[in-house]
Amino acid sequence: MSVEHSNHHDAIEGHVDEHTAQQLHSDVTAYYRFNCEKMSELSSITVTVFALFPRIQQIRSMWMTDTQQGAVTLSDKNNMISLR
């Protein structure tokens, strides 16, 4: 597994108003590989990270199996990756 983190905002000197503070963000890139012995029985994956880290607003997920691939943007309201 490889995990990369990059913080995309520059150091800010002086006062930061509330509007500017809301525009600052951090991106995290992670790659996971799972092996499933019964892949034909797996239809979805539920991502529970939003409950653990409530400030995460969205996750852009790309997935692939032996026969399909797809992408979905996840949120606390839509936290399931459908593999079918």
Image: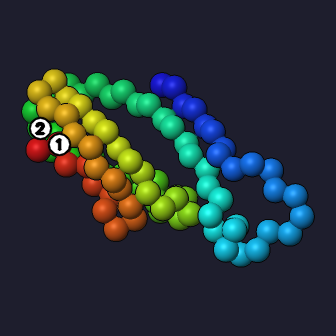
- Please name the amino acid that badge 1 sits on: Leu
Q: Closer to the N terminus: mark 1 or mark 2?
A: 2
- Image-quadrant location for residue 84: top left
Separation of marks 1 and 2 at Cα, in angstroms = 10 Å
Count of number-bearing discs: 2
Vertical arrangement, residue 38 with respect to residue 23, above or below: above
Q: Could you tell whether 41 is left or right of 59 in the image?
A: left
Residue identifier under label 1: 83
Q: Residue at x 42, y 51 (%)?
A: 59
Q: Is residue 21 visible?
A: yes
- Please name the amino acid that badge 2 sits on: Glu
Q: Secondary structure at mark 1?
A: loop
Q: Residue at x 28, y 36 (%)?
A: 63
Place of residue 82 in the rendered image (x, y in percent of width and height, measured from the top left): 19, 49
Farthest-out residue, bottom: 18
Place of residue 57 in the rendered image (x, y in percent of width and height, measured from the top left): 48, 61
Nearest to the observer: residue 71 or residue 19: 19
Vertical arrangement, residue 68 with respect to residue 8, above or below: above
Q: Is residue 38 visible?
A: no
Residue identifier under label 2: 41
Q: Residues within 10 Å of mark 1 (few under 14, many from 20)?
A: some
Place of residue 40 in the rendered image (x, y in percent of width and height, measured from the top left): 10, 33
Q: Could you tell whether 22 is left or right of 82 in the image?
A: right
